[in-house]
Amino acid sequence: MLAEALALSAALFTIGVVGVLIRRNAIIIFMCVELMLNAVNLSFVALSRYYGADGQVFVFFVMTVAAAEAAVGLAIIISIFRHRQSVNLQNINLLRG
Amino acid sequence: MTALPAGIMLLLQEAARAGGAHPLAGTAADWLWLVPVLPLLGFLINGALSLVAVAHPGPADPDAGHGEAKPAHALPPDTAGAHGDDHHPVARHRFAGIVSVIGPLVLALSFALTAAIFFAMRAAHAEEPFIQNYFTWMITGELDLAMAFQLDQLAMVMMLVITGVGTLIHVFSVGYMRDDPGYPRYFAYLNLFVFFMLVLVLGASYPVMFIGWEGVGLCSYLLIGFWFSEKANADAGKKAFIVNRIGDFGFLIALMLLFANVGKLDFLGIAAVAPGMSVAVVTAICLFLFLGCVGKSAQIPLYVWLPDAMAGPTPVSALIHAATMVTAGVYLVARSSFLFSLAPVAGLTVALTGAVTALFAATIGLKQWDIKKILAYSTVSQLGFMFIAVGVGAYVAGIFHLATHAFFKALLFLGSGSVIYAMHAAYHKTGSHEDAQDVRNMGGLRRYMPVTWVLMWIATLAIAGIPPFAGFFSKDEILASVYARAHGSNLAEASLLGIPGSTLLYFIYFIGLVTALLTAIYMTRMMLYTFHGPNRTGEAERGALKEAPWVMTGPLVVLGVLSAFGGWLNLPKVFTDALPVGSTFALEHWLEPVVGEHQLAVTHGKAAHLAAGTEYVLIGAAVAIAVAGILVAWRMLKPEQLVPKKDAPAEQGIERVLAEKYFVDEGYDRVIVQPVYQGSRGFLWRGVDAGLIDGLFVNGSGWLARGFGWLGSAAQTGAVGTYAWVLVLGVIAVIGVFTLR
Amino acid sequence: MIQLLDSIGYTGWVLPALLLIPLAGAAVLLALASRGNGDEPGPARTARMIAFFTLLLEFAVSLGLWWSFESGAGWHAGVDLAWIPTWGVRFSIGVDGIALMMVLLTTFLMPLTVLGGWTSVRTKVHSYLILLLVMTTGMLGVFLARDLFLFYVMWEVMLVPMYFIIGIWGGERRIYASLKFFIYTMVGSILMLVGIIYLGIQSANPVTGAPDFSYAAALQLSLSPAASFWLFGAFFLAFAVKVPMFPFHTWLPDAHVEAPTAGSVILASIMLKMGTFGFLRFALPLFPGVAMDPVVRTIIIALAVVAIIYGALVALVQPDFKKLVAYSSVSHMGFVMLGIFALTVESVQGALMVMINHGISTGALFFLVGMIYERRHSRLIDAYGGIARVVPMFAAALTLVALSSIALPGTNGFIGEFLVLIGSFKTYPLLTALAATGVIFAAAYMLWAIQRILFNRLDKDENRHLPDLNWREIGLLTPLVAAIIWIGVYPAPVLRRMEAAAFDLVQRVERGPPSGFTAPGARP
């Protein structure tokens, strides 16, 4: 049972990583990040059956962080969209040194 | 606050203990400290007056208009009066009256006290020096140095010369400087000088002496640059100080050597162990001490400051640059006779340096036109004579010449001051800017200032060595001593640079004779051009030439008497045998407790006096040479053919070399001053400091950090996708490393 | 006096009081600053008065040490409190013979610095004074600390206010100068922090394992030669930058020139002493094996002699008078380093005297430069000339102070240099003789500068109406001039108070490391 859960988690995580790497739309990248987080959550829950409830506690932490991240991230994306009429990350390099 | 009175009590007890057993205790000598403190008080009062007057400018204060330098002739004629050697504002300071009293009075009191102590000393027959410990100066580790004075016969001679001649020059200054706006400042410096000079001669240890040694240098600096608005004067003061510092460097090294080898720095302590020290160490100490003397007493190669020092007021030249400060080097050698008498090589060096300097300066003196410059080179030359004496271990002869020189050279300088005063007043009347110090502008002055003329001739005969004037006896004593020591002394047995000492001593004797000839020539030349022949001052100015007031000629007369009879201080035996005058070798007997033993150490215990026959020959030769010099100058030089300075043609050939002083100043400038300055500026500052250290290393490391920062920031493309790729690849790499390892 | 001090329990509270009084003053000013703006003349004046009297009180309190600690032997008036127990850090302070004069010098100069900036600092007066007061605590803490950690904290505490004082109230290139000063000092001190932590761990309590940062414990450590060498290097760098030794000196001219008068005075008079104080307190007693290593010692002494001559020669050609004084400091501090590493009782005492005298004389020089700068707004020597005629009192003061700076006998400057020279000559004759040429160059640069400022023709119209010193300035200079003469003529009381500590130091260093490694060849 554990092996299947971990495999699913790994698959989800890889999909998320690939999505983050190859997509250009900020919203989709954002959703891919969420996907990665939830993949990790899944492995936490699965492993907690064998190692005690600590993993489930962590899941709550991750969900909280994900919620906060979603709020802040979406706000940033919206504000970028308002300025540029686009959420294509290739056109945005505000972080350049 | 309890520490201070307790400390003073302790000091008094200490002082009482130290002086307890000495025959001078309980006499006037207990007031020894007051001798230097009186001039110090004068300095404080006069200095305060000069600063107070600035804070509250009065109606007669030239600085009332906030220091506008008014040219002399712009002032109303009634304020015109005495002048120094320079164009400076003429206006009487509002405290001139009180300063005229305080300045000379403290010196006169100091002299009176010195005289009282002198008589106490004569009565007490003290063989041992009278040490007065006032308080602990420096104490640490092995060093225990008291602020202490040492009164002995040598210090007493110096004190009498300093306070005696000093008082006369202070009185003269009242006339000479009264109408200078810096009058209180002048007297403040002059008083301070006397204070330091007395500390110099009274100090019981080298460091205490060094206080005076550098202190007189400071006062010399301040007084040479007294009229500091003229750059040349300020330059001359600075030059004097820096050149003296080169000598002081030698003095300091000698102190370090003494401390490292003896562990003590007081004269008595060193004298006690000196005979046990290795000759090499003593020689090194003596040579470094002598470097100090070379600076202070203007010997080759450091003599260059003294002629420039004539930029100061003339009484200063008389007091500091002729009678007292410049002879401090001679005093130092005599004071250190317990060291120098053990180091014949050092003694030969001293004597040879003195001889070469004496000759060298005398040749320059032949072609100078500035009356003060002639006297300055003459001073350098005479100091050379004194060093010949102390170098060959004839300490009494050196001190004797020091004293007589103080008399006649002070007289010559003050006399020249009197002449310059008259010349200046004359030129001042017509607003002319001719040089008041150039002998070519003088001539025939004996008709206008007869007193000065007579007195200056006395001094000239004295310096030329004509009997029975003072200089004859002292100079003859020096030459006879050199001659005697060539026959038998530790000097004659030693050798310097491979040349045997006796040969060197004969050579020095010969140079001494040549210098005596040149001295007679250039002094006669100066007198001839100044006082004889037709007057060249100018038609309009001639009427204004007149004798100086009595406050100035009075001291001249006293000095004239001293120059004429100063030789009585130390009459040679051949003289007292022939004539029923005075006592034989009075000064020699007086100084016996201080230097007698060391003089004998040089001459292997024999009395250094020659057989009467030899001595007659030597005296005859010396007198013949002096007379010949005067006659040659008198016959060869034609004052009638001189033209005033402004019409005079430039010198050519050897005359030019002499008039330009062998171009030594220019040489020093090019070989030392400019390389140091340019090297410091171009290489050390711009190159090493700003370029290498600050530029390459300090700011270089800053630029390096910036460079790395730039590289790092260039990697920040701003494209988040790239970051994500880098991140993932990095994770894969890390996992790969850990799994494949 | 002793009875009076004993009756008020002086030694029990004096040192904490010295650290707290300035902080209390700073707190008062902080409270005032929240209400009124220091840019207005009224509140600014009040603030200055508060700061001045706080520091005057500080001086009065510290003065008791002069009598209560006359022997100068061992530690005095110590206070030892737990501070950060888990790290073994204690708030341990005390004064010894070396620190005594440094403390008195600091408390003596600080009120004067407030007077010196009375009219020249007109903006953000409250902040300025608060920084001065905090800095006072920091500097005293450095001198008093008996705990390495506390020492380091205080070392940094005094750095920050100085950074702001230069950076906010400085001259045109103040940002560059303050950054340079800060980074330079930081580079040195961060390595020292590593060294301190290492020492603390080395002397850790064997039972509890808690580190021990106390100075006494560090003295007892027996370190391997290699460890000693690297630790010495870390401390050396921190202190050498602060001294500053050649070739770590280039921050000094910039910082001095750009700092406001008070900043320059504190930098020159007190902060530079921290470097040499560090050598005396830590680098030498903690690592005697390295300090006595002939190679290390000769290199340091050679650098000191280079600094003496090099500083003087570079000072000679400076067009800016403040920069000239800065380079002259490099030269003077070379004498201190020479005296310390020559390590005879006379030379160490001489080094301590030069530290005091340099504090007084160079402080006075910077005050005088500040005064003339306030009138004329130029530090360039060529902007002046002949002003002795216009401002004779200024001229008299400047001449006297300059003479003390070039070590004229009878002034304080001579005592220190003389002791250093005769003491060092015993161990390093040739290098010391070379150092003595410094007296010639010192005369050259100082007198030449004095001549171009005070003497020569008064040829610039701007200088014709300069006002002479006012009463505030006379009051400020009088104590300095008095100290110059007093120490020059009667230095014995000062020397006596420092002798035991100097003797102890020389003994301790010559005895070598506490145990085990006695061989001097301590190199990896």
Image (spheres, rainbow, N blue to C red):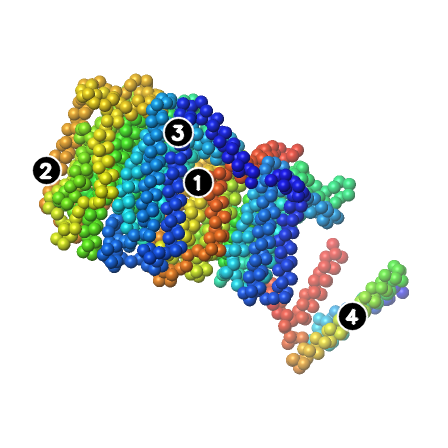
Reply above or below: B262 against B247.
above
Q: Position of residue C523 (x, y in %)?
A: 59, 39
Query: Would you identify the image quadrant in which residue C96 lies?
Result: top right
Left or right: residue C61 compared with residue A57: left
Q: CA distance from mark 4 to mark 1?
A: 79 Å
In space, the residues marked 3 and 1 are separated at their CA atoms by: 24 Å
Q: Secondary structure at mark 2?
A: helix
Q: Where's residue C80, x and y in %?
A: 70, 44
> To which residue does mark 3 refer?
B29
For the residue marked with disc 4, what is the amino acid? Ala
> The disc labelled 1 sits on which kind of residue?
Gly
Q: Nearer the viewer, mark 3 or mark 4?
A: 3
Question: Mark 4 — residue?
Answer: A66
Q: Which mark is residue B635?
A: 2
Mark 3 vs mark 1: give the one in front: 3
Give the numbered dot on residue C410.
1
